[in-house]
Amino acid sequence: MEEAWDSVLTDPTDREVYRRSRQGQPHGLGVSPVLLVFDATYAFTGDADEPVVDSMRKWRTSCGQRAWRALPRIAELVSLFHRLGRPVIYSRAQERGGHALPAGLWRSPAADDAEPAAIEGNRINEMVSPGPDDLVIEKSAPSVFFGTPLTRYLVSFLADSVVICGGSTSGCVRATAVDAFSYNFNVAVAEDACFDRLGHSHRTALFELNSRYADVLRTDDIIGQLEPRS
């Protein structure tokens, strides 16, 4: 089966090295997973299903259609975890006075302070809105582990694994997956429920994650592994 990142590994020598290294071996999902939904906010999804270059005219950080293709798959995962009675944790940018906190070294010199990056931009897209029992963590760095109570939450839930979706694949998804792996959680990344502004960045991040830190799986495969069998 063709993988989303196959176009990244084109050199024959690289393919042979990858095969011989036995990288990409699955770790498994564990028996007590938690779903992490990253930055599915209007600032990153835009407010319409339109090409990314069009969406960026209003939302500089939008991933446009790439996000809108992922949103229904995110919704499927959220629904699955609700049915299973398993925790769902969302992340979004930390706010202060109705605006996202200064981004520090994240900030682009070309950023336009006039863009709609206040409350509206940091609101989670209604297609995947959190339920009443879901948690929302505000973060100020790519990894949601940095400076937040996430680890304490995962310990309290007796979690042994995390399933990650949202955006961006090469940013917050990748950073958190590496940290989760470092904390000895099994990690699964739902490739078709993740999004990025650049297709190349998306595919490269998936390849690197699957090589070392996570099982990169399609949403249907994750559902098939976690859905109780009658």
Image (cartoon, rainbow, N blue to C red):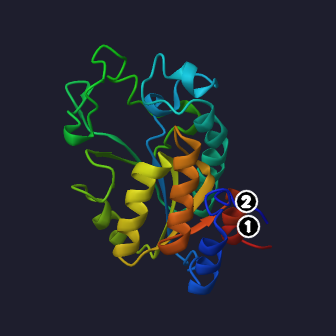
Image coords of residue 179 (percent x, y):
35, 66
Q: Position of residue 3 (x, y in %)?
A: 70, 61
Query: Which quadrant holds the C terminus?
Result: bottom right
Say which residue label 1 marks: 224
Mark 2 and mark 1: span between their CA atoms?
A: 6 Å
| Residue drawn where x is 57% and y is 27% of the image | 52
Amino acid at dot 1: Gly
Residue at screen point 64% across, 58% down: 5
Which residue lies at the image location 71% right of the left edge and 65% below the top edge? Answer: 221
In the rendered image, residue 139, in percent from the top left (x then y), is placed at: 29, 46
Q: Is residue 22 visible?
A: yes
In this picture, residue 223 sits left or right of residue 207: right
> Residue drawn 63% across and 66% down?
11
Q: In the rendered view, would you say 148 is above or below 72?
A: below
Q: Which residue is mark 2?
A: 220
The answer to which quarter of the image holds residue 75 is top right
- Asked where in the image residue 81 lies, by quadrant, the reply is bottom right
Element at label 1? helix
Mark 2 residue crowding within 10 angstroms, few (<14) / some (14–19) / many (20+): some
Q: Position of residue 148 (x, y in %)?
A: 25, 55
Q: Amino acid at mark 2?
A: Asp
115 versus 140 height, above or below: above
The dot on residue 113 is none
Q: Nearer the viewer, residue 12 or 103?
A: 12
Q: Is residue 89 shown to the viewer in this render?
A: no
Residue 55 falls left or right of residue 155: right
Name above or below for residue 152 compared with residue 130. below
Badge 2 vs badge 1, beta-carbon distance below 8 Å: yes
